[in-house]
Image: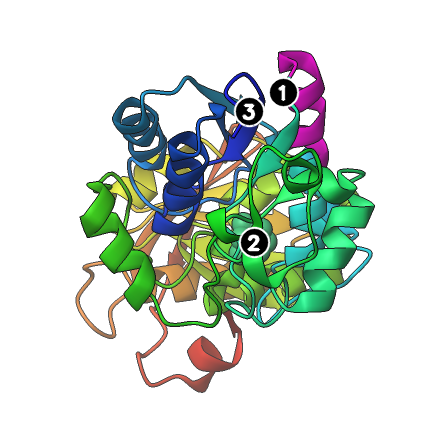
Amino acid sequence: MSGEKAKAIALLSGGLDSALAAALTKRLGFGVVGVNFSTGFCTGQGRCDTVLAAGKGLGIPVRLLDVSDEYLEVVKHPRFGYGSGMNPCLDCRIFMLRRAKALMEKEGAEFVVTGEVLGQRPMSQHYRALKLVAEESGLGDRLVRPLSGRLLPPTYPEKRGWVRREDWLDIQGRSRRRQLSLARQWGVDWFSQPAGGCCILLEKAYAARLRDAFAHLGPDRMKKEDFALLRLGRHFRLSPKVKLVVGRDETENAMLSGFAPGRIRLDFPDVPGPTALLEGEVSQDELLLAARIAARYADSPPGEETRLIALMGGKPTELRVKPLSPDDPRLRELRVG
Ligand code: SF4
């Protein structure tokens, strides 16, 4: 093989497949630069650490790129629609690969590798989707999927004679058996186990909240912080224009305080209770209902009046309400996600 000097960009997600694809590319003698894109919707603690550990294990440099501002547009207006949640997988792949292409050109690399496996994911990894993503990203035959390479049309490194067809693998489908066996064989142990997906847009509760926000606020009016707030607390839709968010624990209460500017904040001065935020054009009736819902989660004696302070534009207003009973159907009917 004469490809020792060619360089590849490898997308590293922190998972096993992308680590193996990068490892195989390196084993075939190519120079590899890893890249990870932070979209703002990633799940999993220490993901960047895992990616950096993968880079260290492979002995390759890794670029960590924050694309969260531009990525919002992908989530708001995907050309190819959403998957089972609000995950715009095809648009997401195209977006990331366009970024990887720009990096390839900047770094003087010749091709891009990913850990995609034919038939592993219903939306983005069937044959036609892999082809579409290669075309739409502008990478064409410079996009290489080493784990399924033998099953896919020849790519640039193969056409140039840098690799033989049989150098790639022929993995397909959802089973992880072959990948785990290769990981053991190659000593690849710096990856996180897949646990329900890498992205919060797949999660049922988050997807329901996002759909609700798109329906009532509209995607184009949503700012980055609105997407972040959807990750916290219990959400209640009180009317088309009014939503309540109630913290679930101390950490969330503290985090919710950071979202208070521009919203009405409800606090419990006399008993331990959640921080709650109200957003929208709030009527007096809605304010009282919100206070009763929030009070349901405070440590106030059942059936007794509780005192709350509503901070509106920095101006405190005192409210006294009876908490909603835990059986009150409105708690279920108004809940989002
Ligand atoms: S699951 Fe999320 S991060 Fe993964 S391809 Fe789909 S949208 Fe992108």
Where are the magenta residues, as a range? 98-108
**Residue under the point 31% across and 27% down:** 58
**Residue under the point 65% across and 65% down:** 212
Residue 216: percent from the left, percent from the top?
73, 61
Residue 221: percent from the left, percent from the top?
77, 43
**Amino acid type shown at disc 2:** Gly
Secondary-structure class at tag 2: helix
Q: Picture quarter containing residue 263?
A: top right
The mark nearer the N terminus, 3 or 2, is 3
**Crowdedness near tag 2: few (<14), some (14–19) or many (≥20) residues, C-alpha within 10 Å:** many
Its colouring scheme is rainbow
Of residues 221 and 75, the one drawn nearer to the viewer in this rendering? 75
How far apart, in angstroms, are the residues tagged by discs 1 and 3?
A: 15 Å
Residue 193 in the figure: left or right of residue 121: left
Task: Look at the picture and state if 15 lies above or below 156.
Answer: below
Q: State the residue position of label 3.
A: 2
Q: State the residue position of label 1.
A: 109
Dominant secondary structure, magenta? helix
The mark nearer the N terminus, 1 or 3, is 3
**Crowdedness near tag 3: few (<14), some (14–19) or many (≥20) residues, C-alpha within 10 Å:** few
How far apart, in angstroms, are the residues tagged by discs 3 and 2?
A: 19 Å
Q: Picture quarter containing residue 224?
A: top right
**Amino acid type shown at disc 3:** Ser
**Residue under the point 79% across and 52% down:** 77
Using the image, tell me which numbered label, if any, was put on residue 325: none
Secondary-structure class at tag 1: loop
How far apart, in angstroms, are the residues tagged by discs 1 and 2?
A: 19 Å
Q: State the residue position of label 2.
A: 149
Of residues 255 and 141, the one drawn nearer to the viewer in this rendering? 141
